[in-house]
Amino acid sequence: MKIIILFVMIIIISACSKPEEQSTTALVLSEINGAVLWERISTEAEYKTYAFWPDHEDIQPGQSPHGAYHKIYINKVLSEALPSMDKVLPEGSIIVKENLDSQKSLDAITVMVKVKDYNPEAGDWFWAKYTPLGEILAEGTPVGCISCHQGMDDNDYIIVRPLDLEI
Ligand code: HEC
């Protein structure tokens, strides 16, 4: 009897635990585009399996223009690089930001992925914005995204937290 209870508990626990992020190789210059990036974060290594930005878990209040609330997910390559004392994230880092409206429903998904040699003048980030269904609203080096994030170029264009913050 005890064995059966134990067995049932193991099944319940494993069904509830979050699936592991799939291991993948970094997206490279010759292949990167908005569709390839969407495939990566929606299928090959689904972003909902990523960790949240440390000390910034689940739904958090956000600032204009991104929406009233957000969730910020980071892939394993990025989370393993934090804290980053030189404040430069490694190739293959992916940040997925769910932008939620004032009702906390998903409005858009904005993504940054670091691709070696993609755009050395601005941190080698490939930027993208999608509808919740994955339609591309912006991709590549949109002037809007870069000009606003540029203010944090000494933090690798990341706004939410200093990269060298130890938590
Ligand atoms: C007018 C300023 C502004 C513009 C334009 C902007 N962002 Fe942001 N972004 C922010 C702020 C502020 C944050 C910090 C989180 C928050 O408060 O919403 C942020 C956070 C992010 C993050 C999470 C990582 C980080 O830097 O903190 C991603 C990913 C992101 N933005 C992508 C984009 C993309 C893609 C675009 C263009 C389609 C874009 N952003 C345009 C201001 C901006």
Image (cartoon, rainbow, N blue to C red):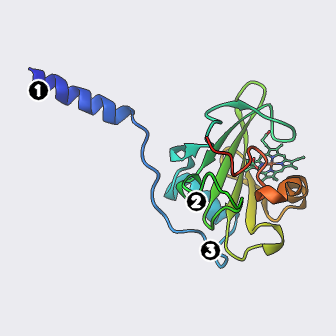
Instruction: Classify mark 1 as within 8 Å of ligand 1 or not, answering yes or no.
Output: no
Tell me the residue at 70%/31% (across/down).
60
Cβ atoms at labels 2 and 1 below 8 Å apart: no
Left or right, 43 with respect to 69, comes to left
Q: Which residue is mark 2?
A: 39
Q: Residues within 10 Å of mark 1 (few under 14, many from 20)?
A: few
From what the image shows, is residue 12 above or below residue 43?
A: above
Count every numbered label the image shows and give the total: 3
Nearer to us: label 2 or label 1: 1
Q: CA distance from mark 2 to mark 3?
A: 14 Å
Q: Which residue is mark 3?
A: 28
Q: CA distance from mark 2 to mark 1?
A: 42 Å
Tell me the residue at 56%/49% (across/down).
47
Picture quarter with the N terminus: top left
The image quadrant that residue 61 belongs to is top right
Left or right, 79 with respect to 158, comes to left
Tell me the residue at 54%/47% (across/down).
50
Q: Give coordinates of residue 144: x percent, y percent.
A: 90, 56
Q: Which mark is residue 159?
A: none
Depth check, front residue: 28 or 166: 166
Which three-letter amino acid code belongs to the residue tagged 2?
A: Glu
Q: Give coordinates of residue 36: x percent, y percent.
A: 62, 65
State the SS at label 3. loop
Q: Which residue is mark 1?
A: 3
Q: Give coordinates of residue 98: x percent, y percent.
A: 69, 41
The image quadrant that residue 120 belongs to is bottom right
Left or right, 74 with respect to 10, comes to right
Which three-letter amino acid code belongs to the residue tagged 1?
A: Ile
Which of the marked residues, 3 or 1, is nearer the chain's N terminus? 1
